[in-house]
Image: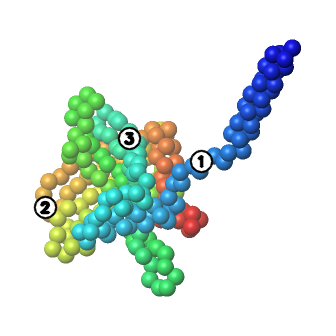
Amino acid sequence: MHALLGRGAASLRGAARSAGRAAGAAVRPAAPAPQRPSAPQRHYADYASTRAVAEGTYDAAAIESAAPSRVFVDWTVYKTKGAMTVKFIKPTWTPANGQGGGFVVDRQGKLLLEFAASTGERSYGWDQKVSMAMSATELGQIFSDPSQEHSFFHDPNMMDASAKGTVSKSLRWSAAPDGRGYFVNVSTGGSGGGKAGVSVSLSKAEYYVFETLGRYAIPYMLGIDMVFAT
């Protein structure tokens, strides 16, 4: 009898200890989740990295610890005669003047279009690609009336009087005659010699994706998202 009582008491003590451990585990606070840097911190890290490289004071460890890993995405349309890739360029920021601090947009973002001519079956000459960095307004011109023809002219050396006109790029947007899609034609030229041209067609479905990406990107290209993130 005493043995049975002893075993029963031991069982009760063991159950109590187990219950105590379970209760302790239940109330123990969870470890805080790692915090992703806020949007202002991320943009400041981008700005600091750019400025540090220019000034020769780049501290990779310090800057990378404040900035998340960069992410690169794109979308490509492959056709018989050529291919077009859509990429995104973020705006750059600079400290605002005045005692209030903060940042202002230094250069607006762009939607980068890269074109490559076909060099064979499922092969494209990306080493000879032609790039056009489209502004928010230029995208708006296309999206507001895609059935009309639109032409854009870019001079990469516009701000350099000695090199102005040596390279020129033009993009022409037009609707397909049968109304079932669109054509994007890009060409390069200029007094520096050398010409290249690529033509890519977009189906209605491909245009839908292109416009959706562009409409989504425009506020970010202008930096408007930061107004609501701070």
Q: Reply above or below: 149 against 26.
A: below
Foreground pick, 15 / 220 = 15
52 horizontally vs 146: left or right:
left
Within-10-Å neighbours for mark 3: few <14, some 14–19, many 20+:
some
Q: Earlier in the sequence, mark 2 or mark 1?
A: 1
How far apart are the alpha carbons under marks 2 and 1?
Answer: 62 Å
Foreground pick, 125 / 8 = 8
203 horizontally vs 24: left or right:
left
Q: Amino acid at mark 1?
A: Ala
- In percent of the image, x 87 and y 14: which residue is there? 1
Q: Earlier in the sequence, mark 2 or mark 3?
A: 3
Disc 1, SS: loop
- In percent of the image, x 77 and y 24: which residue is there? 10
Q: In the rendering, which numbered label is found on residue 31?
A: 1
Q: In the rendering, which numbered label is found on residue 218?
A: none
Within-10-Å neighbours for mark 2: few <14, some 14–19, many 20+:
few
Residue most extreme to the right = 1
Disc 2, SS: loop
Residue 198: percent from the left, percent from the top?
A: 27, 45
Q: Amino acid at mark 3?
A: Thr
47 horizontally vs 156: left or right:
right
Disc 3: which residue: 76
230 horizontally vs 171: left or right:
right
Q: Quadrant of residue 230?
A: bottom right
Disc 2: which residue: 192
Q: Quadrant of residue 150?
A: bottom left
How far apart are the alpha carbons under marks 2 and 3?
Answer: 30 Å
- Say whether residue 225 is visible: yes
